[in-house]
Image (cartoon, rainbow, N blue to C red):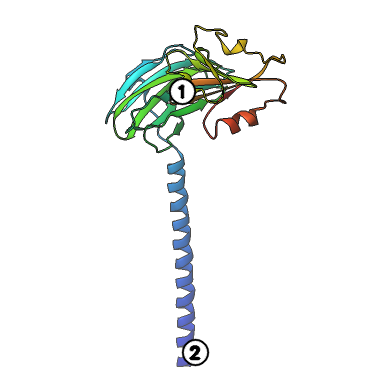
Amino acid sequence: MVRKLIILTLLVSLVNCSNKKKDNSNQNLLLLLALNSQQKKQPGIDPTSISATEITLNSTNSTSGTISSSDIYYKATLVSGKASLFGVFGLSTSLNLQITAYDSVGNYAGAINKNSEGTVEQISIGKSASGVYYFRLSSVSGSGTFRVQIFNGPVSGNGICDLSSSCIDNASGSTFTSANCTSGNYSPSTASPSTCAGKVPLFGGTITAKCTTFSNNGAQTLNRVNGFGTFTESDCASTVKGEAYLFE
């Protein structure tokens, strides 16, 4: 009889222990889910509490800045129906920057950092965005100078790299020289053709697609002409090799 009681007591203890482990596991799972939810939700900003330099959409002039330990804010008024591309280029060689974007009321809208010093950073904002958007620049490491521009369409104006099947036009306010034009003929903005839209190959043709992205020399638009097959958005994405872009 005593032996039976001992066995019964042991069984009850094992059951209770098992239930406690289940309870603890459930509690741990809920805690992990809560932490994961907090990590996914990025903090926003209060637009009324920051000082942001305004930049003009599609301006041919870039805006220069200097950063060290304190964050710097820029703002631009976006237009619904067209995606926008905000780029930071011409970085000092020791500077590693992160871009964080926020909508008109300060909600988090995305961030980008390639974790590489002296490397261009850029972020695209979707077609549904409208109103004032804010862009925070943070130094991940280093300090130095940079330039910013924002576009919602192809750029033109400051030098052309004339290729057999396409041409690359660089935005005014950016540094673009013959050294940036490889496997092609370089023309400054004052020469003919003065814009990439004027590029027509010897066999004839018209512009069929435009793919815009930033290099560390500024925004550049690749204008693809017909005669070499259809140039799709997938081709644009492949051409810019993982960078943000605009396609039309």
Whether residue 15 is situated above or below residue 182 in the rendered picture: below
Label 2 to label 1: alpha-carbon separation? 92 Å
Local crowd at mark 1 within 10 Å, few (<14), some, or many (≥20)?
Answer: few
Local crowd at mark 2 within 10 Å, few (<14), some, or many (≥20)?
Answer: few
| Residue 115, x across and y down, in percent | 40, 38
Q: Is residue 54 left or right of residue 182?
A: left
Whether residue 208 is situated above or below residue 68 in the rendered picture: above
- At mark 1, the secondary structure is helix
Q: Is residue 107 visible?
A: no
Identity of the residue drawn at 41% across and 15% down: 62
Identity of the residue drawn at 38% across and 26% down: 136
Q: Is residue 234 left or right of residue 3?
A: right
Which residue is at the front of the view, 34 or 218?
218
The answer to whether marks 2 and 1 mark residues whose Cβ atoms lie closer than 8 Å is no
Pointer 2 or 1: first along the chain? 2
Which mark, by number, is residue 188? none
Report the residue marked by disc 1.
179
| Residue 21, x across and y down, in percent | 46, 67
At label 2, which amino acid type do we have?
Lys
Which mark, by number, is residue 4? 2
At label 1, which amino acid type do we have?
Ala
| Residue 172, x across and y down, in percent | 46, 12
Which residue is at the front of the view, 158 or 243?
158
| Residue 103, x across and y down, in percent | 46, 24
Residue 246 position by quadrant: top right
Q: For the C terminus, give its image quadrant.
A: top right
Identity of the residue drawn at 41% across and 29% down: 99
Q: Is residue 204 left or right of residue 62?
A: right
Whether residue 142 is situated above or below residue 246 in the rendered picture: below
Q: Is residue 124 visible?
A: yes
- At mark 2, the secondary structure is helix
